[in-house]
Amino acid sequence: MSWFIRKEKGISTPTEMKREAPDGLWYQCSNCKKISATREHKLNAYTCIHCNYHEKIGSEAYFELLFDDNEFEELNSELTSGDPLKFTDTKPYPGRVQATMAKTGLKDAVRTSHGKMNGSPIVIAAMDFNFIGGSMGSVVGEKIARAITYSLEHKIPFLMISKSGGARMMEAGFSLMQMAKTSARLAQLLEAKIPYISMLTDPTTGGVTASYAMLGDFNISEPGALIGFAGPRVIRETIGKDLPKDFQSAEFVLEHGFLDFIVDRKDLKDKLTSLLTMLR
């Protein structure tokens, strides 16, 4: 005998009486598709509690994870892109920049700040992929160069967190010039014996990989990050051969000597502190 028998059929609940979960309460991993509480996902440094997939995050999250009590002072926050080439594709470049600024709340594809990490001063530059694919334009190069100058003047370590599709095509040669500018400034950091740690996250490609992202005293990465210059399809068509399994993954790049180590984001702050302590 059942405990409950529905005597009326077709019972429906009015829309105004339905209860729904608030938006943003749950997080579904894009890798394993399993669900966890958004709060738990954030406390786990934005990594999946089931498969440890590292979700793509931007400068705001990295600053929160690394700076003590999320306290920092941003450098050159008002710099924005010009339009030196009067570039237009599907829309004028200034319009694209303004639309992206309104959508993301960012001024450009990198933010630079200084503060303390486990009690020690540090300068951090973190890229944002949401801003035109994290592309490297004049503002990105200038902000990184000025952040390095701040490190030089105050003799404190510099951490670069790269996440980029490469050079910004709307600025053409002006974008490519940032490779030389940032590399030259990093050479000054080397001469001054001030530590530079380059962290490559998913994805780090193109001119960024070919310049400041690979010039660290230590080059490190997050698990599973895509790291390379050209895309796999372009390379495959160029050399006419199939590529190895997991080609351009952080693990593959580490195995072939282009990285010093891979660090889980949950351990990042402590690992960086230990590394910088050894370099003093």
Image (cartoon, rainbow, N blue to C red):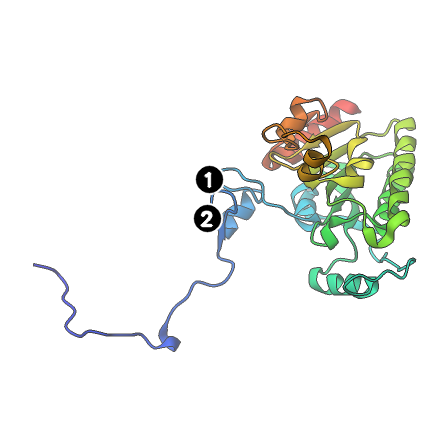
Percent from the top left, x then y, of residue 263? 63, 31
Residue 170 appears left or right of 200: right
Q: In which image quadrant can residue 177 be found?
A: top right
Residue count near mark 2 (Cα–Cα under 10 Å), binned few <14, some 14–19, many ≥20: some
Whether residue 115 is situated above or below residue 258 in the rendered picture: below
Q: Could you tell me if residue 138 is visible in this image?
A: no
Q: In which image quadrant can residue 99 be found?
A: bottom right
Whether residue 100 is situated above or below residue 246 in the rendered picture: below
Q: What secondary structure is marked by label 2?
A: strand
Q: What secondary structure is marked by label 1?
A: loop
Name the residue nearer the viewer: 211 or 57: 211
Q: Residue furthest front?
A: 240
Residue 246 disc label: none
Whether residue 131 is situated above or below residue 255 in the rendered picture: below
Percent from the top left, x then y, of residue 8? 17, 75
Percent from the top left, x then y, of residue 269? 66, 35
Q: Residue furthest left?
A: 1
- The residue wearing badge 1 is 50
Give the quarter of the figure containing the C terminus: top right
Q: Residue at x 72, y 51 (%)?
A: 133
Give the quarter of the figure containing the N terminus: bottom left
Q: Residue at x 68, y 22 (%)?
A: 256
Q: Could you tell me if the residues under marks 1 and 2 are in contact, i.e. CB atoms within 8 Å?
A: yes
Percent from the top left, x then y, of residue 69? 67, 46
Amino acid type of the residue that numbered disc 2 sits on in the rendered structure: Ser
Q: Residue at x 69, y 53 (%)?
A: 130
- The residue wearing badge 2 is 36
Q: Could you tell me if residue 103 is visible in this image?
A: yes
Residue count near mark 1 (Cα–Cα under 10 Å), binned few <14, some 14–19, many ≥20: few
Amino acid type of the residue that numbered disc 1 sits on in the rendered structure: His
Residue 202 appears left or right of 44: right
